[in-house]
Image (cartoon, rainbow, N blue to C red):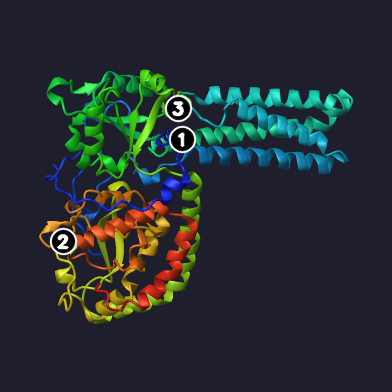
């Protein structure tokens, strides 16, 4: 049961990282979505229009999109956690109830605060019991407001009945009359705003999780049917190795290719989870599929069948549920809302302070670059971010503009004639990385994480990603300005397969151990490591 989604143990994240194995597979097909521009070039600042990332979504064939694909695909890093916003909405509701009660208490001249505290608590309890912070996808605004009004009314009635045991009913109603009006009006308006905001997030593809299914089976069809009914998850596509024996779509959801096509499909940065719908009784087939999906950074879950749960002595309460169907996580790391929130808060706080402190230095570096060599001050490069998302990373230009290598086809060597005089200084001190603070503040990167590599980066004559099977596992967390690998000697070019394996090993180790204290330690050690590592080639 330890691999079930809702039962991750903290110590599982603290195990030493397994040494990556050599990647021996064949080159993956360059599958691209028919309704998305493929663009794969990077540019120097300012990027030309054709050098920018393709738009998240371009109108295309409805048959190819399927019935659940949102109008705008949003990268998985931008997916909003519904539970966090449910707590936020609930907290704002409680704050409003308390403020109205305080105002009524002060203006009413009452000396008994319990007269207002009791109905405040009872209304909050009723709002929770009516599940009004779930904002179901299939519930309209009128229905939600009607249920909100009913919950408020029942909460007030319960509060009044409790107070009636201690005070005359007429006195209770007299003291609460103004509070009741304020509560009804305020909560009615707030919940209308909450509902409209959630609908907007869903339209932007940021609220509902996106999944793809492996296996065009009856279980997959049942999952798609329930997803269509509840709207709690978007099934973007189905992948199956038996394409010749399957229809082009399953309940309207298109078959996008086989398992190998899934590994390189351009839809994957927008996918939160891969669901394996192969019958659990076919254990050998399940093992083969899971092994084939191992290179993915995305979370992989197995759709559990009822007879499997019964045989294992489990209930659906022991597993994660999607559209009321049980899932077991078989690959990927557990996502902890608290840790992610703290990490993002540190990025915003420390990143903002770092930007203020670094602005004078950045201005001097920009001036030096402008005076040293012709060309733009900034350099942009396409790199891989969370879940293999293509992001544009900002740097100060350190090479001659006419020989800039946006795809890192040739990594920097000692005495490289492409590097300018100022470039040697800012690369040796990592001052060229300072513009990435903007990537951190925008949410594409974090202060601490695996360093982002250029897409198509080469180690010798081989693409670096082909050298290690678990290479994409380093993309299970946002890339960082600094990281565990950087302070442990793996900084700069990776010239040999062993360098690539060492970098991936350290990055995966960090992802499995990540915590606030480890991040603070890495930040504190970064500058001493830079000063003491002047021989590192960059």
Q: Is residue 431 left or right of residue 186?
A: left
| Mark 2 vs mark 1, CA separation in Å | 40 Å
Quadrant of the frame with the N terminus: top left
Residue shown at 38%/76% (left/top)? 363
Q: Earlier in the sequence, mark 2 or mark 1?
A: 1
Cβ–Cβ below 8 Å for labels 3 and 2?
Answer: no
Which disc number belongs to residue 137? 3
Q: Is residue 338 above or below residue 162?
A: below
Q: Return the x and y of residue 233 as percentages of the image width and height.
A: 38, 30
Q: Return the x and y of residue 496 as percentages of the image width and height.
A: 17, 63
Q: Which residue is mark 2?
A: 459
- Secondary structure of the residue carrying tag 1 is loop
Q: Is residue 346 above or below residue 273?
A: below
Q: Earlier in the sequence, mark 3 or mark 2?
A: 3
Figure quadrant of residue 433:
bottom left
Q: Return the x and y of residue 460 as percentages of the image width and height.
A: 12, 62
Figure quadrant of residue 108:
top right
Residue shown at 15%/77% (left/top)? 417
Q: Which residue is mark 1?
A: 6
Residue shown at 49%/57% (left/top)? 516
Q: Earlier in the sequence, mark 3 or mark 1?
A: 1
Q: Return the x and y of residue 107 as percentages of the image width and height.
A: 83, 42
Rate crowding at label 2 as few (under 14), some (14 to 19) or many (20 or more) other CA atoms within 10 Å. Answer: many
Figure quadrant of residue 361:
bottom left
- Secondary structure of the residue carrying tag 2 is strand
Residue shown at 57%/39% (left/top)? 87
In this rendering, the label closer to the viewer, 2 or 1: 1
| Mark 3 vs mark 2, CA separation in Å | 47 Å
Quadrant of the frame with the C terminus: bottom left
Rate crowding at label 1 as few (under 14), some (14 to 19) or many (20 or more) other CA atoms within 10 Å. Answer: some
| Mark 3 vs mark 1, CA separation in Å | 23 Å
């Amino acid at each position: 049961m330890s691999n079930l989604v809702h039962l991750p143990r903290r110590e599982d994240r603290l195990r030493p990282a397994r040494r990556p194995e050599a990647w021996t597979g064949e080159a993956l097909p360059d599958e691209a979505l028919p309704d998305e521009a493929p663009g794969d070039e990077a540019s120097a600042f300012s990027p030309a229009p054709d050098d920018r990332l393709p738009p998240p979504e371009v109108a295309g064939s409805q048959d190819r999109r399927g019935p659940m694909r949102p109008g705008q695909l949003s990268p998985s890093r931008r997916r909003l956690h519904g539970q966090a916003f449910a707590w936020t909405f609930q907290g704002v509701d409680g704050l409003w109830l308390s403020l109205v009660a305080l105002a009524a208490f002060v203006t009413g001249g009452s000396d008994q605060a319990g007269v207002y505290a009791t109905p405040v608590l009872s209304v909050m309890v009723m709002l929770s019991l009516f599940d009004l912070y779930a904002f179901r996808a299939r519930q309209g605004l009128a229905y939600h407001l009607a249920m909100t009004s009913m919950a408020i009314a029942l909460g007030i009635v319960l509060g009044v009945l409790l107070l009636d045991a201690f005070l005359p009913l007429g006195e209770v109603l007299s003291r609460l009359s103004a509070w009741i009006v304020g509560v009804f009006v305020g909560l009615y308006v707030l919940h209308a705003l909450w509902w409209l905001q959630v609908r907007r997030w869903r339209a932007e593809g940021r609220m509902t999780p996106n999944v793809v299914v492996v296996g065009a089976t009856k279980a997959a069809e049942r999952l798609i049917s329930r997803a269509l009914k509840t709207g709690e998850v978007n099934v973007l596509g189905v992948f199956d190795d038996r394409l010749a024996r399957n229809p082009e779509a399953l309940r309207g959801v298109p078959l996008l290719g086989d398992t190998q096509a899934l590994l390189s499909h351009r839809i994957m940065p927008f996918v939160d989870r891969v669901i394996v719908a192969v019958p659990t009784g076919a254990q050998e087939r399940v093992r083969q599929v899971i092994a084939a999906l191992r290179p993915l950074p995305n979370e992989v879950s197995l759709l559990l069948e009822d007879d499997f749960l019964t045989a294992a002595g489990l209930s659906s309460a022991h597993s994660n549920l999607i559209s009321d169907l049980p899932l077991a996580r078989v690959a990927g790391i557990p996502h902890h809302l608290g840790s992610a929130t703290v990490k993002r808060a540190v990025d915003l706080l420390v990143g903002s302070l770092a930007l203020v402190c670094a602005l004078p230095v950045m201005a001097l570096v920009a001036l030096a670059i402008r005076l040293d060599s012709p060309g733009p001050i900034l350099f942009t490069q396409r790199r891989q971010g969370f879940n293999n998302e293509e992001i544009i990373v900002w740097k100060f230009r350190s090479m001659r503009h006419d020989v800039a290598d946006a795809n890192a086809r040739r990594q920097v060597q000692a005495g490289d004639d492409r590097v300018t005089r100022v470039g040697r200084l800012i690369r040796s001190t990592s001052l060229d990385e300072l513009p990435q603070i903007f990537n951190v503040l925008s949410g594409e990167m974090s202060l601490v994480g695996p360093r982002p590599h250029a897409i198509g980066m080469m180690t010798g004559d081989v693409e670096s990603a082909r050298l290690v099977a678990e290479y994409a596992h380093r993309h299970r967390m946002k890339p960082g300005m600094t990281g565990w690998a950087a302070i442990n000697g793996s900084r700069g070019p990776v010239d040999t397969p062993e360098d690539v394996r060492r970098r991936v090993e350290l990055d995966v180790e960090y992802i499995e151990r990540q915590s606030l204290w480890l991040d603070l330690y890495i930040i504190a050690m970064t500058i001493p490591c830079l000063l003491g590592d002047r021989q590192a080639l960059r």
